[in-house]
């Protein structure tokens, strides 16, 4: 299914619009007495949304006790003595765990003033048992909203590299070199490509496609012009550009800003 874009003047306006939708869904879930499960990427794309969501939480005095944060991925390293994969230290600047805790959970909890997300509701895939992540997502009833982002040079989504199968599940992957180069921009604390980990644990393309109730792809900035072009043109999943899983998901939406080359208010 082709997904037409909704275009905003800049990332801040985009973030505020999406955050308002999420805040309303959080309110609806609380009223219905059910959890609200939010799938979150780390990095630049959704940062304006997370910031705006904290403002919505404060303004609406939302209770977040029923909110579950499902992080999409994390860098992993292989132990020299055991050969087993483990997540990188969560205090590293490029850790997705650090990003999720500080820029999502702590920011939302500060806005919620005692009505925040409890530690057991912040989820990150475990490279020691990646299959358990999918079981846990299924067990809670799926992800209410998966926020997605596309790699600028290779279309990776989470850490799924080009060539990822449409039915892939949460697993450890070798990161594509283009993905690692993209992450030099995402995390400027890296001193060079040799400092970017070579492996990651990630939700799969199938995890996103099958276990989400709706998805929103967020792309902004001039460096995402090619990503927007590929996403607009896609009618179904193209493994050469994994972010095109958007086309196969339930209730998909594509949000972009004018810096990608589109114009707000005009059809693509």
Image: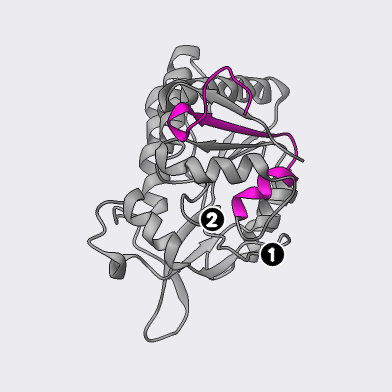
- Report x, y in % for residue 176: 48, 67
Within 10 Å of the Cα at label 1, are there few (<14), some (14-19), or many (20+) other Cα atoms?
some
Front one among 65 and 43 = 43
Which residue is tagged 2?
156
Residue pictured at 47% horizontal, 35% vertical: 260
Residue pictured at 69% horizontal, 64% vertical: 165
Which residue is tagged 1?
165
Query: Is residue 83 highlighted in magenta?
Result: no
Task: Give the answer, above or below, for where 88 lies relative to 252.
Answer: below
Task: Give the answer, above or below, for where 40 lies relative to 85.
Answer: above
- State which quadrant residue 76 falls in: bottom left
> Which mark is on residue 3?
none
- Report x, y in % for residue 15: 47, 26
Give the residue at the far top of this rendering: 59
Q: Is residue 112 visible?
A: no
**Alpha-carbon span between mark 2 and mark 1:** 12 Å
What range is drawn magenta here?
A: 242-268
- Report x, y in % for residue 201: 52, 63
Residue pictured at 47% horizontal, 18% vertical: 56
């Amino acid at each position: 299914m082709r997904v037409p874009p909704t275009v905003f003047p800049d990332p801040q306006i985009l973030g505020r619009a999406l955050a308002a939708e999420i805040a309303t869904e959080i309110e609806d879930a609380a009223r219905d007495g059910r959890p609200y499960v939010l799938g979150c990427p780390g990095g630049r794309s959704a940062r304006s949304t997370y910031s705006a969501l904290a403002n919505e939480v404060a303004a609406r005095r939302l209770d977040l006790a029923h909110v579950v944060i499902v992080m999409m991925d994390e860098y992993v390293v292989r132990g020299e003595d055991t050969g087993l994969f483990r997540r990188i230290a969560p205090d590293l600047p490029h850790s997705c765990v650090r990003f999720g805790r500080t820029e999502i959970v702590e920011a939302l909890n500060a806005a919620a003033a005692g009505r925040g997300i409890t530690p057991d509701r912040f989820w990150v895939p475990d490279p020691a048992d990646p299959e358990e992540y999918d079981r846990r997502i299924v067990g809670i009833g799926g992800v209410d909203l998966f926020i997605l982002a596309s790699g600028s040079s290779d279309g990776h989504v989470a850490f799924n590299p080009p060539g990822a199968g449409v039915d892939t599940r949460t697993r450890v992957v070798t990161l594509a070199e283009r993905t690692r180069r993209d992450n030099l921009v995402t995390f400027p604390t890296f001193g060079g490509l040799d400092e970017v980990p070579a492996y990651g644990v990630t939700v799969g393309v199938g995890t996103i496609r099958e276990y989400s109730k709706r998805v929103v792809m967020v792309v902004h900035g001039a460096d995402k012009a090619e990503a927007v072009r590929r996403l607009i043109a896609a009618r179904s999943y193209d493994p050469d550009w994994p972010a095109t899983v958007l086309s196969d998901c339930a209730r998909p939406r594509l949000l972009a800003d004018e810096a990608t080359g589109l114009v707000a208010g005009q059809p693509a």
